[in-house]
Image: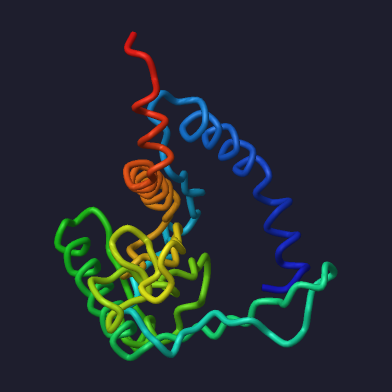
Amino acid sequence: MTRSRQLKHFFLRRPGLARFGVDWVRRRNLASRKLPSVVLRDSNGRYTLDVNAEQTPNPDSRVSLAQDVDALGMPRLSIDWRTTAQDRDMLARGMALIAERLNASGKAEVTFDAAGPTGAADRCTRIGGHHIGTARMADDARSGVVDRNGEVFEVKGLYVSGAATFPTSGFANPTLTIVALALRLGDHLAASSPAVRSHDRAQPVG
């Protein structure tokens, strides 16, 4: 859409945008049960289908250190993020299933262009990605980088805590899982540290 058409839409739809802003604050921010999102009603009754999906682990996708450095002299990250045929196939089949169920419900209709779900999956853009799994948790060094406690297999005493240890990416919003892993690692370190155990034994009984 050109800039002039965008401005035209903005000025023509200002009352609707204002009502939407009030509705957004009421239902997403002020309500006791907050909605994750509030959608702006389309005058034609058409909406874009926003799809997020998990990727399969792919060793060809990598995060490494680049040759150039930032303002503090630290190496910048080089991100080589790739999708696979399996990723796109799962996405296409998922969208086809969503369309089938929604269309059967009679409440909404999902339509694709001539290329169908496969074409839609091939055109998906890289939005809101989480770079995960660069130090995978596994049962042995052949399958990952750290064990179930986050300890690096080849460097005893070195622990990794974060999304890097995820065996698979999951769907979205990894923060709660990261916090859970950090708390779990803290408990493990506390239980395995001689200094901590000695300190606990020295505490007076209340």
Residue 53: name its quadrant.
bottom left
Residue 4: name its quadrant.
bottom right
* Residue extending farthest top: 206
| Residue 60 image position (x, y, % from top left) | 43, 90
Nearest the viewer among 186 and 199 is 199
Query: Is 45 drawn above or below residue 169 in the view shown?
Result: above
| Residue 144 image position (x, y, % from top left) | 33, 77
Query: Is 104 drawn above or below residue 38 in the view shown?
Result: below
| Residue 64 image position (x, y, % from top left) | 58, 82
Nearest the viewer among 161 and 82 is 161
* Residue extending farthest right: 71
Quadrant where the N terminus lies?
bottom right
| Residue 2 image position (x, y, % from top left) | 72, 73
Residue occupying the point 42% across, 48% down: 182
Residue occupying the point 50% across, 83% down: 62
Nearest the viewer among 190 and 134 is 190
Residue occupying the point 46% across, 85% down: 61
